[in-house]
Amino acid sequence: MKPSFILFLKRLYGDSFNREFGKEGPGINFNRIPVYSLEKLIKLFNVYQGRNCNVYTSVYTYDPGKPIPMKKPAPRYIYPYNKNVILDRIFIDFDKDLTDKAQTEYNNLLLDSSRQDFYQRLIEQGQAKAPINEAKTVYEYIVKSFQGNPTLIFSGAKGCHLYIHFNPVKLQHPKETILHFVNKLEELLNLKHMDDAVKGDFSRVSRIPTSKHPKTDLYAHPWKVDYSYNEIIENSKNKNIPFDTLDLEAARSNLTDLLYNIDSYFESQKERLKYESILRKHTRKNIVSSRDKVKIEAPEDILLLNQFPCFQALPYTHDSRVILALICLWMGLDPGSTVEALKIFAEDKGYYNPSKHLNDIRQIKSLKKYPFTCNSMKKHKLCKCKDGFCKNWFYLKLDLPDEFYKLIENYHE
């Protein structure tokens, strides 16, 4: 008899697919590798769960006739997720971040067990209640308006995931269509806890349901809409999945016609959207003159970034450290000076911690993920700019080389 979690994942993902598996944990930096079957996914799942890692897989599956390559060709290969996505679901992530006070208290704890206990107490006291209630609101709206039954998954920490299922559709503008649909849900239902970075992101990986969250020691289990908050959290303390029933045929909502209608609108507007994009690129090039651009010529110059609201209250996270290091490197600092600059910046903010300091910049492998535009920083929950302060293009105020702009030319904000 197969374990219940395998049955649930089989129903959610299917036996064969074209996805990626992601992992990160003690001594393991985040990376992702292709997986073409549930059997392979389960093997990786078990290995890395045993090493106390976070384990993820692609939210969406892609055309099996165009498999994600096991080894990506040099120099840079980007799999065309958007073109090959098999669109049979919409993924929404609901989150509520810790308060600054709670985050500081959590960061100051030294033992992993103490951190787990602290985070678990926060969740028991209601940290994830608002995101879970919003997921219930969306669930009920979808059932009422489009029938079917979305899948609800507790994230194991500060929120939950929701999958809206439907018959596969082939869209000309899938990203724009999904963004439009989800944004309308957010506006109509007055939602406050949707993660913007997830909307319409077809390369997104998400925590595998039934896996354990290392920060909390809680399991990311499915739950039903009539479960109470306490019931959801209590179930997450047990390794055994509370239920493994999932009938995708019955779960599918009647969204097909609506999605095609939205897609048709974007197709009719594609020429206008194309020229608007070109106009925006020309307009933003004239925002700031070259003589006004910020230069970082020595480690202490990193404090010049404090003139931007994004950096005045920048949290001390992996994403923020990588972005700061990339800015220094692009502006000409050598690796040693870059490490020193990060230390100066952290000391200025009062949160320098040698154990968390980015000492080896070889950890930075991809500019694609961190173009440090305002929109990108918002996706990583780093941007604090007031509307209009930098017109979403603060990076144009930095003295960056032409190579930087060539590299992000195809990055769509």
Image (tube, rainbow, N blue to C red):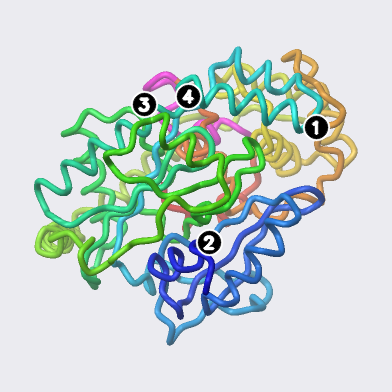
Q: Which residue is mark 3?
A: 130
Check the image and report above or below for 170 versus 327: below
CA neighbours of label 4 inside 10 A, class few (<14), some (14 to 19), many (20+): many
Q: Nearer the observer, disc 2 or disc 4? A: 4
**Residue 57's mark?**
2
First in residue order: circle 2 vs circle 1: 2
First in residue order: circle 1 vs circle 3: 3
Question: What residue occupies the far front of the structure in this picture?
Answer: 1
> In the figure, residue 94 lies in which quadrant?
top left
Q: Which residue is mark 4?
A: 127
Circle 3/circle 4 CB separation < 8 Å? no
Magenta-drawn stretch contains 348? no
Q: Position of residue 275 (x, y in %)?
A: 26, 54
CA neighbours of label 1 inside 10 A, class few (<14), some (14 to 19), many (20+): few
Q: Nearer the observer, disc 4 or disc 1? A: 4
**Residue 356's mark?**
1
Residue flagged by tag 1: what amino acid is it? Lys
> In screen coordinates, is 191 left or right of 61?
left
Residue flagged by tag 2: what amino acid is it? Thr
> In screen coordinates, is 109 left or right of 168?
right
Q: Which residues are magenta?
A: 386-398
> In the figure, residue 116 lies in which quadrant?
top right
Quote the CA–CA distance across marks 2 and 4: 25 Å
Quote the CA–CA distance across marks 1 and 3: 31 Å
